[in-house]
Every structure is written in C-alpha cells, then in structure tokens.
C-alpha cells in the first residue's frame, strides 16, 4: 500500500490510498483538484502554441 505525506502545506500526517489529503484536510480537496485542472489546461495550451509555432517553423527549415 502506498503511504505518503498529506499535501496540505505544513502537514506531516501520513496518507494511504488515493486521497492526497489526510482526514483533517479533506476540505482542501476541491481547491486542489481545481488547481491541478488549471495547471493541466495551462500546459495543454502552452503545448498547442509551441506545436503551432516552433515545431511548424522547424519542420519548414528542415526541408
């Protein structure tokens, strides 16, 4: 079974299973998931912009 520290800042409680937070900080889960979704959206947008500009330019210069 996977055991790790709670993701709440400054909390050193151990958590097992799929939850990133201990029982004391389960209220932080929705904000955490929202932040992760925002990060993924940002990364996806950045990758799309990179692919459209840098990759397209390098494929033209290689041929």
Image (cartoon, grey):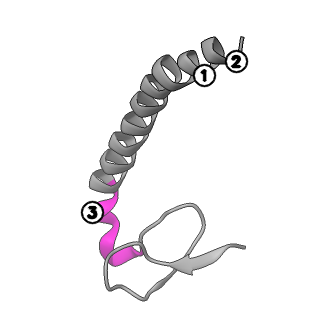
Mark 1 or 3: in front is 1
Q: Residue at x 42, y 24 (%)?
A: 49
Q: Residue at x 38, y 74 (%)?
A: 23
Q: Which quarter of the rendering shows the C terminus?
A: top right
Q: Position of residue 40 (x, y in %)?
A: 43, 40
Q: Which residue is mark 2?
A: 62
Q: Examine the residues drawn in magenta and state their main secondary structure.
A: helix
Location of residue 60 with respect to 1 vertically, above or below: above
Location of residue 20 with respect to 53 vertically, above or below: below
Q: Which residue is mark 3?
A: 27
Q: Are marks 2 and 1 in contact (CB under 8 Å)?
A: yes
Q: Residue at x 44, y 86 (%)?
A: 13
Magenta segment includes 26? yes
Mark 3 or 2: in front is 2
Which type of secondary structure does the marked residue at label 2 adopt?
Answer: helix
Q: Which residue is mark 1?
A: 58
- Region rendered in magenta: 22-29
For mark 3, does the 10 Å Cα neighbourhood hold few (<14), some (14 to 19), or many (20 or more) residues? few
Nearest the eye: 46 or 19: 46
The tag earlier along the polypeptide, 1 or 3, is: 3
For mark 2, does the 10 Å Cα neighbourhood hold few (<14), some (14 to 19), or many (20 or more) residues? few
Q: Mark number for residue 29?
A: none
């Amino acid at each position: 079974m996977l055991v790790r520290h709670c993701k709440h800042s400054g909390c050193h409680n151990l958590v097992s299973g799929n939850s990133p937070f201990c029982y004391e900080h389960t209220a932080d889960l929705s904000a955490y998931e929202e932040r992760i979704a925002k990060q993924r959206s940002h990364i996806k947008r950045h990758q799309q912009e990179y692919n459209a500009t840098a990759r397209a330019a390098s494929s033209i210069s290689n041929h």
